[in-house]
Image (cartoon, helix red, strand yellow):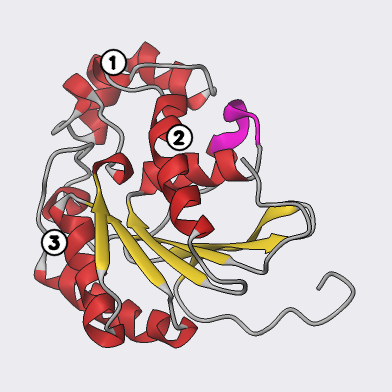
């Protein structure tokens, strides 16, 4: 699932949506369609002003409102239209959805612990993490293939979906995907394409970085 050999210098910015009320309440959202809070809208507008500077060639988004409304802020600044995909939705987590972290641990403690150990778990009877990657990564790669050399794709999605997509594109074993820490609301990660495929250039960023100068460029 890595980039093409030789590399075309493309970049993929994977941007998490802004804050929702369920984020504040530590409720598992999954594919429940929750709106942004006023703070979430402000976060999206602030981040969009920064991300507009990378001059995206394409913007794709989950079709859930919290992601689509976040993407709309960047589209308004850049004039780049947003294409929405069901495949970029957050993990479906069945009975876990709508429960707080405390409730999940209390009711499904063994299942939760197995998931944190990296075991394949259908949380609440929902999707496996690998199944999320199976549906999301091809959407991202398909959009990336349409980029010009050196082009930038912005993907607006959800924390769990972004983590599994990064893991798949980097060719990591699924048991290690948890080592990619979570994204804060409206922060992003950046994959750059090099001679040996995709590499993680930034993770959980909230500002534009300085160029990498040195032997590891």
Q: Is residue 92 above or below residue 21?
A: above
Q: Which residues are magenta?
A: 172-177
Element at badge 2?
Answer: helix
Nearer the observer, 48 or 106: 48
Q: Which residue is mark 1?
A: 108
Would residue 10 be counted in the magenta stretch?
A: no
- Callout 3 environment at 10 Å: few (<14), some (14 to 19), or many (20+)? many
How far is the residue under mark 3 from the one under mark 1? 28 Å
Q: Is residue 57 left or right of residue 37?
A: right
Instruction: Please say if the residues under marks 1 and 2 sit with CB atoms less than 8 Å apart.
Output: no
With respect to residue 109, does 163 lie above or below? below
Query: Residue 120, percent across and down?
Result: 48, 17
Q: Residue at x 24, y 31 (%)?
A: 102
> Mark 2 highlights which residue?
133
Residue nearest the viewer, comparing 199 with 206: 199
Instruction: Return the residue at label 3.
Output: 36
Q: Secondary structure at mark 3?
A: loop
Q: Which quarter shows the C terminus?
A: bottom right
Closer to the eye: label 1 or 2: 2
Depicted 59 relative to depicted 34: above or below: below
What residue appears at the point 25 percent right and 18 percent down from the top-left corner? Answer: 124
Answer with left or right where residue 27 lies relative to residue 120: left
Q: How much space separates mark 1 and mark 2, taking CA atoms?
A: 24 Å
**Farthest-out residue, right:** 215
């Amino acid at each position: 699932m890595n980039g093409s050999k030789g590399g075309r210098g493309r970049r993929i910015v994977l941007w998490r949506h802004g804050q929702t009320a369920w984020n504040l309440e530590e409720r598992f959202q999954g594919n429940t369609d929750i709106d942004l809070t006023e703070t979430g809208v402000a976060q999206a507008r602030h981040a969009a002003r920064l991300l507009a500077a990378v001059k995206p060639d394409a913007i794709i988004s989950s079709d859930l409102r919290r992601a689509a409304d976040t993407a709309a802020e960047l589209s308004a600044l850049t004039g780049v239209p947003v294409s929405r995909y069901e495949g970029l939705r957050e993990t479906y987590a069945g009975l876990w959805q709508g429960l707080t972290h405390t409730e999940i641990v209390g009711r499904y403690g063994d299942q939760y612990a197995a998931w944190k150990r990296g075991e394949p778990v259908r949380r609440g009877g929902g999707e496996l993490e690998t199944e999320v990657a199976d549906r999301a990564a091809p959407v991202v790669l398909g959009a990336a293939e349409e980029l010009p050399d050196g082009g930038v794709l912005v993907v607006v999605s959800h924390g769990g979906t972004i983590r599994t997509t990064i893991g798949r594109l980097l060719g990591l074993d699924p048991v290690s995907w948890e080592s990619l820490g979570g994204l804060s609301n409206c922060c992003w990660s950046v994959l750059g394409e090099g001679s040996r495929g995709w590499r993680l250039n930034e993770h959980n960023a909230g500002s534009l970085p300085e160029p990498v100068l040195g032997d590891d460029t």
